[in-house]
Amino acid sequence: MPTTFSPTCIVTIAELRSYLATARARGRTIGFVPTMGALHEGHLSLMRKARSENDCVVVSIFVNPLQFAPDEDLQEYPCDLSRDLNACSSVNADIVFAPTPEEMYPKPLDTKVKAGKLTKTLCGASRPTHFDGVATVLVKLFSIVGECSAYFGRKDFQQLVMTQRLVDDLSLPVRIVGCPIVREVDGLAMSSRNVYLNTTERSQAPMLRQALEAAISRIRAGEKDPAAVRAVMRETLTKASSAEIDYAEVVSAVDLSIPKPLNGEIRLLVAVRFGETRLIDNAGCVIPDKP
Ligand code: AMP
């Protein structure tokens, strides 16, 4: 039987700072995994990676109200701290930081981070305030945790690219580590929001992955026109009759621009709505300069 131990649950900023100051004074490196809880294997994969690379692993669980628009699912967002603590325990995380909204935002913020043009397209087009909320909470969390390696899933690819840029632009002492997307056996990317899907929607949800695979096959067959690649993804997504397509796009993995013709490191991204539930997925591929 592998030995596991319970992580210490910390709810105040002061206590987390004090704990980490002691850890650093002892020469310990810090691995940080920011989450909104409702943990699944995708989150646990980030924690395992952090565990393998650091002396001390901190997981934050905070459903950040700033990144939800008024018509989004903040109130319904799944939440079960004791289950999440068990999950963190199973991967030997040291600390779970689970502040209340009042601890994080004791007064209305007068200072917020404004994310730049990387966040104006894709998810940012239909969620215009989302990335400002993410950027603001990340700057706050990075400031609380301090120098660390921080682990993010490629599942939220635009968030990952924005976060790397945020850290570069503001010289934050954080090394960003991107981690692979973890999927269910039928290919659906794991997400805390998958629990909202009804049986029909759940059976159609793997179409997101299939759309990405169809597009990658077309690119491997030589397609370099972004419009043609978008059309392949849309054609597959249309087979999910309960889904409404938000976007199906192909971009540069570096700056999220649309290369014409497609070349270099590219990323295919899709977002669809099943009723109120919005799902995203993406996949990468490299197109060599010359055939
Ligand atoms: P969330 O709790 O949804 O804010 O996600 C916290 C972190 O977990 C983010 O870095 C996500 O990209 C990552 N994550 C969520 N789902 C997955 C997944 N299926 N595979 C890998 N990482 C994931």
Image (cartoon, grey):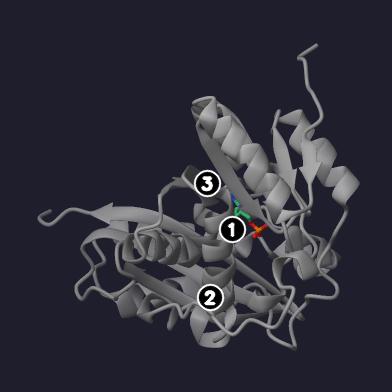
Look at the picture and state if 286 lies above or below 193: above
**Mark 2 = which residue?**
131
Query: In the displayed structure, does residue 265 sit left or right of residue 30?
Result: left
Q: Secondary structure at mark 1?
A: helix
Separation of residues labelled 1 and 3 (CA atoms): 13 Å
Separation of residues labelled 3 and 2 (CA atoms): 18 Å
The mark total stands at 3
Mark 3 packing: few (<14 Cα in 10 Å), some, or many (20+)?
A: many
Tell me what residue is drawn at x 74 percent, y 82 percent.
72
Tell me if residue 281 can be seen: no
Tell me if residue 79 can be seen: yes
Q: Position of residue 49 (x, y in %)?
A: 54, 34
Look at the picture and state if 241 lies above or below 16: below
First in sequence, mark 1 or 3: give its number.
Answer: 1
Query: In the displayed structure, does residue 28 sit left or right of residue 262?
Result: right
Mark 2 packing: few (<14 Cα in 10 Å), some, or many (20+)?
A: many
Residue lying furthest left: 290
**Mark 3 = which residue?**
151
